[in-house]
Amino acid sequence: MPLSNIEIIHQDAAILVINKPTLLLSVPGRADDNKDCLITRLQEHGFPEARIVHRLDWETSGLILLARDADSHRELSRQFHDRETEKAYTALCWGEPELDSGRIELPLRYDPPTKPRHVVDHELGRHALTFWRVLERCGHYSRVELTPITGRSHQLRVHMLSIGHPLLGDRLYAPEQALAAHERLCLHASMLAFSHPQTGERLRFDCPAPF
């Protein structure tokens, strides 16, 4: 598959910053029909050395960082592990939160009977923390900024569902009205900040949501 709908935000000798489109895997899936993905497209079209540092869900669009050599990959992976990076997402959620901002601290775990869903589980779940704030109130939905402190799978989607404001177009978690309110999952990685793995310079990238 070509790179036609993949926007390269930044590239240098050590890193690539990509605006991943929705409905594209970050890495290959297990099934044969899930081999098409961001990393494969990049490796086959000009960036054979590209290495994934972190992932975005299939339906989530926005900023994703890749390394171009082993040392850079090691350093960027360390920054993500040690929570030295900064991330923010733009989302549309169902309804209008009573407050203008808040925090959600609920433990999450994978739920095999309903795979690939995740659930809140106070006994077996792993710690997860999200900050949120309202950017715009639009009647039956709101535009929000979501800042994950931890990086659990489906964290933002499950956390917003847990406070009664599921994301629009979320096929896994949204009830009927919220699902029908938009044709895609309204979750976009809109800001990413980290230290350059070679120079140490602090870099920040912003990418407005397409919804």
Image (cartoon, rainbow, N blue to C red):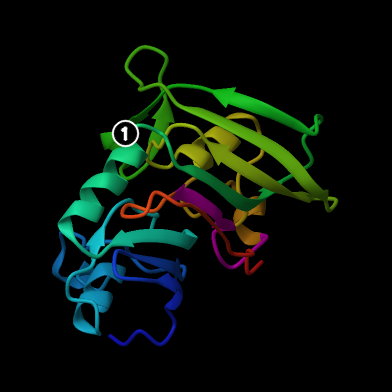
The residue stretch that appears in magenta = 181-194
Q: Position of residue 178 (x, y in %)?
A: 65, 52
Q: Residue furthest front?
A: 199
Q: Residue at x 39, y 49 (%)?
A: 200
Position of the C terminus, as image quadrant, is bottom right
Q: Quadrant of residue 199?
A: bottom left
Q: Position of residue 118 (x, y in %)?
A: 38, 36
Q: Residue at x 61, y 32 (%)?
A: 131
Q: Secondary structure at mark 1?
A: strand
* In front of the other: 153 or 145: 145
Q: Residue at x 77, y 35 (%)?
A: 97
Q: Quadrant of residue 24?
A: bottom left
Q: Residues within 10 Å of mark 1 (few under 14, many from 20)?
A: some
Q: Residue at x 32, y 17 (%)?
A: 124
* In front of the other: 35 or 81: 81
The answer to whether residue 21 is visible is yes
Instruction: Work out whether 64 lies above or below 116.
Output: below
Q: Position of residue 160 (x, y in %)?
A: 59, 37
- Left or right relative to 162: residue 194: left
- Quick check: is 133 in the magenta stretch? no
Instruction: Work out whether 9 lies above or below 31.
Output: below
The amino acid type found where label 1 is placed reads: Tyr
- Left or right relative to 189: residue 123: left
Position of the N terminus, as image quadrant, is bottom left
**Residue bearing mark 1:** 110
* In front of the other: 89 or 108: 89
